[in-house]
Image (cartoon, rainbow, N blue to C red):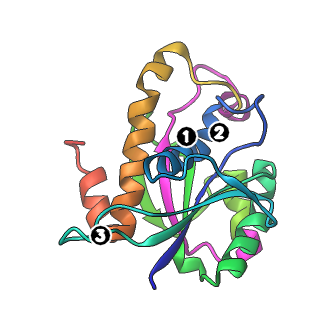
Amino acid sequence: MDSWLVVGLGNPGPRYAGNRHNVGAMVVDELAGRHGGGRLKSHKARAGVAEARLGVLPGGAPGPRAVLAVPSSYMNESGGPVKALLQFYGLAADRLVVIHDELDIPAGAVKLKQGGGEGGHNGLRSISSALGTRDYLRVRVGIGRPPGRMDPADFVLRDFSAAERKDLPFLVGDAADAVEQLVTEGLLAAQQRWHSPAV
């Protein structure tokens, strides 16, 4: 059976819940809500987990089985829980989708890629180090660059602004749609949709 591990990155606890850095976790919550799970349940791999079938295959059959997860560790220690979940569910790194915030993409945009560098993202760096590979899929949720001379580290650990919060449900929804298309239609089809100027 074609299964996936879909991981949304963030920091644990209410203090960080609205931060830009937690948008990956918000997308996993959206997917869990869409697919009847709602709340993630605590897993021994130090993560909140829900199981779902994502999307719909051509012909109308339910999409592939997926384990939706948010590590309960801090962002820079995400690798341990991700590796433990892959091992627990018997999945290889090429069945991993990581959803994360991305400074180098304009706010509100969603892009997808496989492999490549971590762009200074501590969550990705931890996962690549733990797995011994960078060759996993990423859904990159654009949060834009910090204003003026603000340190990027401060920017990502701040809540979305009031104006951004108005558009946040659309951004989270788009990223969730991109994950579903990725696991049902593949990377190329998802890139063609989400990377086109019309999106």
Amino acid type, residue under disc 3 in the picture: Glu
Q: Which residues are magenta?
A: 129-156
The residue tagged with tag 3: helix, strand or loop? helix
Looking at the image, residue 9 sits to the left or right of residue 55; the answer is right
Q: Would you name the residue on which mark 3 appears?
A: 185
Looking at the image, residue 105 sits to the left or right of residue 96; the answer is left
Front-lying residue, 30 or 11: 30
Looking at the image, residue 194 sits to the left or right of residue 124; the answer is left
Crowding at dot 2, Cα within 10 Å, few <14 / some 14-19 / many 20+, comes out as many
Residue 157 appears in which quarter of the rendering? top right
Residue 16 in the image: above or below residue 149: below
Q: Would you name the residue on which mark 2 appears?
A: 21
Give the distance between the C-alpha atoms of the residues marked 2 and 3, in whole angstroms: 28 Å
Q: Would you name the residue on which mark 1 appears?
A: 103
Where residue 29 appears, x then y in whole percent? Answer: 56, 45
Amino acid type, residue under disc 2 in the picture: His
